[in-house]
Amino acid sequence: MPDKKNIFEEAWAKLNDSIVEYNGKPIGTKAASDNTHQTLNYDQIFTRDFAVSAIAFLMKGEYEIVKNFLLETADLQSKEKQFDCFKPGEGLMPASFRVDSKNGKDKIIPDYGEKAIARVAPVDSGFWWIFILRAYVKITDDWDFAHSSKIQKSITLILELSMVNRFDMFPTLLVPDGSFMIDRRLGVYGYPFDIQSLFYSALRSSKELLKSNEENKKYIDAVVERLGNLAYHLQKYYWLDFNKLNEIYRYQVEEYSETAINQFNIYPQTIPKWIYNWLDYDNGYFVGNVGPSRLDFRFFSAGNLMAILSGLADKNESELIMNLFQNHWDYLIGHMPLKLCYPALKGEDWRKLTGHDAKNIAWSYHNGGSWPSLLWVFSAAASKVGKVELIDKAISIAEKRLQKDGWPEYYDGIENRLIGKEARTNQTWSIAGYLIAKMIQEKPERVDLVNFEEDSEVIKCTKKVTKKLNNKS
Ligand code: GLC
């Protein structure tokens, strides 16, 4: 049996080893410290990966590195309205950055996607930045920092970028394939739930963090309204339980009018067979994507767990989501928590939707692989729902192998048994994800740092839009 104390201590030592300094100050953690694979950009500080490290540091009481990161990334945020389409648009934050040291001088080199494999730009960086900021302020009470003009400006720039008028008329965000944790093609273009859920939590964070003054009033009002609209839309079109499945199964198609029931013209023939064994009367979840004639039934863990934390899922739905994990434990947790999505794309679907991506073959990497980094959000959600026994179970599974296997980036296989084919070892967010889970296991109240309580103003707004739009149909 591995020595648990030793695993925890080793994880802290490794997280500390991954710290990157800039001008003598800690500003982030590199994605992985692995010498056995090509480095590519794994030696860089990724915004989304650092979010997990940041929560671990904050829970431990180490605030400086998080503040430095927030300040540096605020500086890196693009501040100019761009008409040059090859430059990062106003408000965009980098996916990653590295520190170059030459002749005793440090220089930061950011990447907004212009160097990334397949040139994928990060839709999620700004949202993670706000999420980290909110946790930092929650634990330190450093409101002077949050209300400084620099930080307020960064928040409003992120809002401007994500709430700009577009061609469609939905409250959800239209995003390209590969623009978030899943940074390769996986048929997640359109309105992927992972991003909508993260967007919702970023809006909730902004509502708390924006200083109440004349200048910010338009942003605060817009945020509250968008939260209501987004919750309405996601609840109505993404939430799937047995009753909803039955409704879709009997959908009429080709309806023209504002009052159409099958608004997205979903053909019942597209319901995949696996769903009949997956859904039961005691479970439910938000589906992966909804758009014109498209309902992606795949289950994505990160967005669903984040929905529990942000309050997008109500109490009942949160329990149904956690039940889904319990009902399908062998696949979603299996031999290593936590599957990123279920099921995998196979055969022709895989060829067409991933572009023949060998890294994303069925049950590997993003395509049905398992990511220990997600242990943090699983443990936090389980604590919120009051199912702490699930945290114990998931951690003891992880402890059997994580350290022994060298803290891999991901695992492969239907039941998450194999170390990922191209997984990096010493992957920082695998380490930080485990540390957060352990700290929550020790003190379940620690979930407060990443949790959002019910907000009556948002609920009121959701009810208002529900009444308004349901009256039309
Ligand atoms: C991979 C992952 C991405 C992560 C990066 C660094 O590209 O897909 O989500 O941020 O590695 O770990």
Image (cartoon, helix red, strand yellow):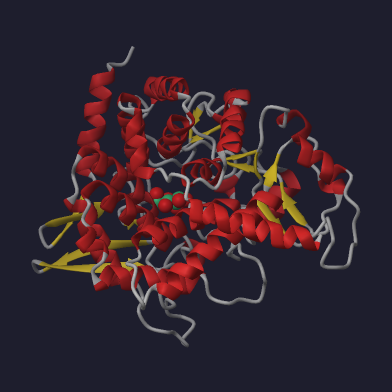
Query: Which residue is rendered at x = 52% and y = 26% of the image?
Result: 417
Q: Which residue shows up at 40% across the image and 68% down it?
A: 112
Q: Is residue 344 above or below residue 419?
A: below
The C terminus: image quadrant: bottom right
* Frontmost residue, 132 versus 360: 132
Image vertical order of residue 24 relative to residue 115, above or below: above
In the rendered image, is residue 187 in sight? no
Relative side of 219 to 356, left or right: left
For residue 250, side relative to residue 156 (left or right):
right
Front residue of 410/208: it is 208
Residue 291 location (% of width, % of height): 71, 60
Residue sitting at the far bottom: 83
**Residue found 35% across the figure and 45% down from its top:** 52
Residue 249 x %, y %: 86, 43
Q: Which is nearer the eye, 23 or 59?
A: 59
* Residue 421 picture location, percent across and down: 49, 38
The quarter of the picture where residue 218 lies is: bottom left
Figure quadrant of the N terminus: top left
127 vs 439: above or below:
below
Q: Nearer the viewer, residue 9 or 472?
A: 472
Q: Is residue 29 above or below residue 278?
A: below
Residue at the extreme top of the image, as rendered: 1
Q: How many marks overall?
A: 0
Asked if residue 49 lies left or right of residue 247, the reply is left
Q: Is residue 447 visible?
A: yes
- Measuring from the top left, give residue 190's x and y in whole percent: 64, 62
